[in-house]
């Protein structure tokens, strides 16, 4: 826990982390004033409860993975370039515990980004109102059309469920960035490798569906799915754990 607290403080002091959180919080504030948002999503926004779906839809495929790749790669790369990692490893604590502290903080960062996105969206939603409305949040049954009238409590439940699923589906990105950070010991190289891997996996859409279902990028719509999400959750957690274990094994043998 001491290592986790130390790494968390370092994370929150990083410019990349704060920039990502700021963009995720501030960008949704534009939606009530953007005239083409409704045309882009093909729906008339009638409630502030619909803005989290708009924000996640815009951010989750590209910007959130970008922020996560850069910041989580920096957990290793910046300390190597700054010469602070080697002295840390000279202390009476094994390498696995050091890497575990960094990995846990990296896995927390997607949740912080998603929470910042949803918080900014709900703040912007005050313009449209957060009361009962007829329609859907875009994150529950019927998507934006809905299946009737939603109360604020029901809408909040759908937003919280989607936020949890969005954070979980981004965990493998954070774990993969840490793995590449250990392998390359360089922030730029690790971030580029992470983003390149994600884009290459997206290209596998041309392969049979049975293979696609095994790819983490095929589950980047998990937060809006209405069917059983358990298989996708399990697969994403397996990827997260697998990348984390590989990062720990590589860190034990890496000369820093």
Image (cartoon, rainbow, N blue to C red):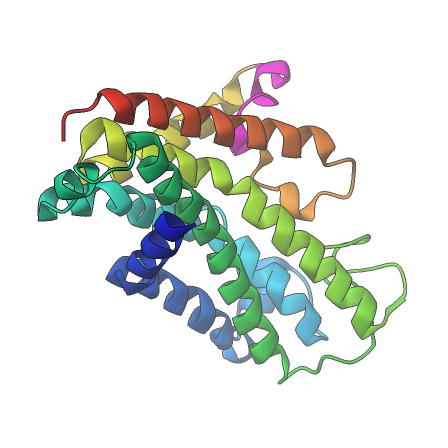
- What is the chief secondary structure element of the magenta stretch? helix
- The residue that appears at 38% across and 33% down in the rendered structure is 176
- The residue that appears at 29% across and 32% down in the rendered structure is 94
Q: How many marks?
A: 0
Is residue 216 within the magenta segment? yes
Q: Quadrant of the C terminus?
A: top left
Among the 4 quarters of the image, the one containing residue 200? top left
Horizontally, residue 229 falls left or right of residue 14, namely: right
Q: Which residue occupies the foreground of this view, 28 or 161? A: 161
**Residue 144 visible in the snapshot:** no
Please state the horizontal and vertical placement of residue 210, each as a whole percent of the image: 63, 15
Please state the horizontal and vertical placement of residue 172, each as a whole percent of the image: 47, 35
Horizontally, residue 183 falls left or right of residue 34, namely: left
Residue farthest toward the front in the current orientation of the protein: 92
Please state the horizontal and vertical placement of residue 180, each as a whole percent of the image: 29, 31
Q: Which residue occupies the foreground of this view, 50 or 25? A: 25
What residue range appears in magenta? 208-218
Please state the horizontal and vertical placement of residue 186, each as a whole percent of the image: 17, 37
- The residue that appears at 38% across and 69% down in the rendered structure is 22
Horizontally, residue 12 falls left or right of residue 135, namely: left
In this rendering, is residue 195 above or below 129?
Answer: above
């Amino acid at each position: 826990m001491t290592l986790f607290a130390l790494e968390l403080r370092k994370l929150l002091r990083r410019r990349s982390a704060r920039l990502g959180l700021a963009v995720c919080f501030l960008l949704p504030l534009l939606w009530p004033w953007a005239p083409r948002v409704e045309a882009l999503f093909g729906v008339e926004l009638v409630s502030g409860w619909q803005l989290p779906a708009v924000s996640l839809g815009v951010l989750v495929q590209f910007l959130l993975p970008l922020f996560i790749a850069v910041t989580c790669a920096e957990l290793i790369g910046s300390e190597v370039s700054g010469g602070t990692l080697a002295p840390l490893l000279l202390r009476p604590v094994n390498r696995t515990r050091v890497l575990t502290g960094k990995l846990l903080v990296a896995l927390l960062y997607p949740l912080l980004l998603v929470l910042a996105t949803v918080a900014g969206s709900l703040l912007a939603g005050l313009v449209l109102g957060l009361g009962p409305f007829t329609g859907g949040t875009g994150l529950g049954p019927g998507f934006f059309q809905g299946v009737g009238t939603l109360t604020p409590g029901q809408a909040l439940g759908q937003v919280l469920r989607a936020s949890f699923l969005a954070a979980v589906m981004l965990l493998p990105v954070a774990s993969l960035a840490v793995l590449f950070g250990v392998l390359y010991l360089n922030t730029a190289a690790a971030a580029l490798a992470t983003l390149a891997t994600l884009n290459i996996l997206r290209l596998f859409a041309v392969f049979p569906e049975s293979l696609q279902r095994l790819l983490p990028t095929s589950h980047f719509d998990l937060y809006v799915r209405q069917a059983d999400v358990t298989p996708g959750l399990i697969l994403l957690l397996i990827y997260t754990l697998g990348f984390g274990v590989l990062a720990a094994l590589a860190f034990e043998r890496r000369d820093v």
